[in-house]
Image (cartoon, coloured by chain):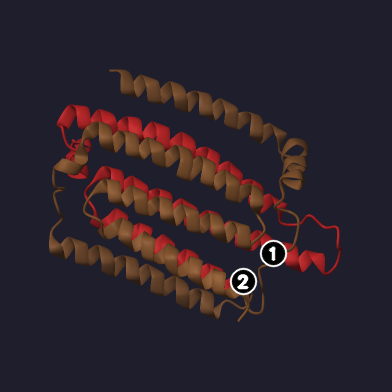
Amino acid sequence: MSTTEILFYFLSALAVFSAIMVLVSKSPVHSVLWLIVVFFTISGHYVLLNAQFLAIVNLIVYAGAIMVLFLFVIMLMNLNTQTEPQKHIWMKLAGVISGGCFLMVLISLVRQAGDMQGKTALMKTGNIGLIGNLGKALFQDYVVPFEITSVLFLSAMVGAVVIGKK
Amino acid sequence: MPIQYYIYLCLVLFSIGIIGVLTRRNAIIVFMCVELMLNAVNLLLVAFSKMHHAAALTLNPAATTGIEGQLFVFFIMVVAAAEVSVGLAIIVMLYRNTHSVDINFLNRLKN
């Protein structure tokens, strides 16, 4: 078993464990911290796939900006002192069963898919994930969507201020 | 690494996100589970991009096939950041009006 495989299994197990801990944590602050662990493991997967630009952007945007926003909101609301109202146990069971059925259906679908047999994802090599190649593609072929996202950000910022002000 | 392993991992993460949305009542945790589902999809897109790149490299060593998948992940992250800012503003407004973030208060929208 090579180092890459060991890292893949370790990161996968850690990601699934932390994702489950996001669900079962009582305090929202603990959920946020476990979600940051999930984002770090997904960044590790990006590094394994040699998508280095996305790994750094994932850390900066998700683990850095978005999660800090979540933490700010939770601490502003002072949520960790009050207990969360729980759903009825049958509703929880129904949610878990429907999520499990979804998982089972999709896994059996993937197992039967002929297109996926024998295909491998390129690990550690391949230079399409480096920032030079991504930047060339972004500013040559995809420059219009890139500019449109700036308009989207502006409207989101105005919307957040308008909603939060009143 | 076979592509199936990545598909299984992303399916498990996505299903955990779905179970979280269905079982929790705290609006912030529901929102965090949506983020988890977005990240599972991002990881799957990168894995598929590398899969197509591996297939194209055997034909042409200078191919950049599959770079679109990674650009798509970049745009998904941009949209997710905008979505989080607006969504958290809505949750703050909900808390200011009801002094709770219980999503069952939101069923007044149906009247």
> What colour denotes chain B?
red
- Left or right, residue A149 beside residue A16: right
Residue B13 is situated, as x and y percent measured from the top left of the image, at: 42, 62
Q: Is residue A30 left or right of residue B6?
A: left
Q: Which residue was labeled with disc 1?
A: A124
Q: Is residue A125 left or right of residue A89?
A: right
Q: Is residue A101 visible?
A: yes
- Residue A154, how many percent across, how many down? 52, 24
* Figure label count: 2
Q: Is mark 1 in CB contact (under 8 Å) with mark 2? A: yes
In the rendered structure, the colour chosen for chain A is brown
Task: Report, in whole angstroms, how far the alpha carbon at label 1 lies from the one at label 2.
Answer: 8 Å
SS for tag 1? loop
Q: Amino acid at mark 1?
A: Lys
Residue at 60 percent across and 44 percent down: it is: B74
Q: In the depicted view, which residue is nearer to us: B89 or A59?
A: A59
Structural crowding at the residue carrying mark 2, measured as other residues with C-alpha within 10 Å and reported as few (<14), some (14–19) or many (≥20): some
Q: Which residue has dot 2 on it?
A: A4
Label 2 residue SS: helix
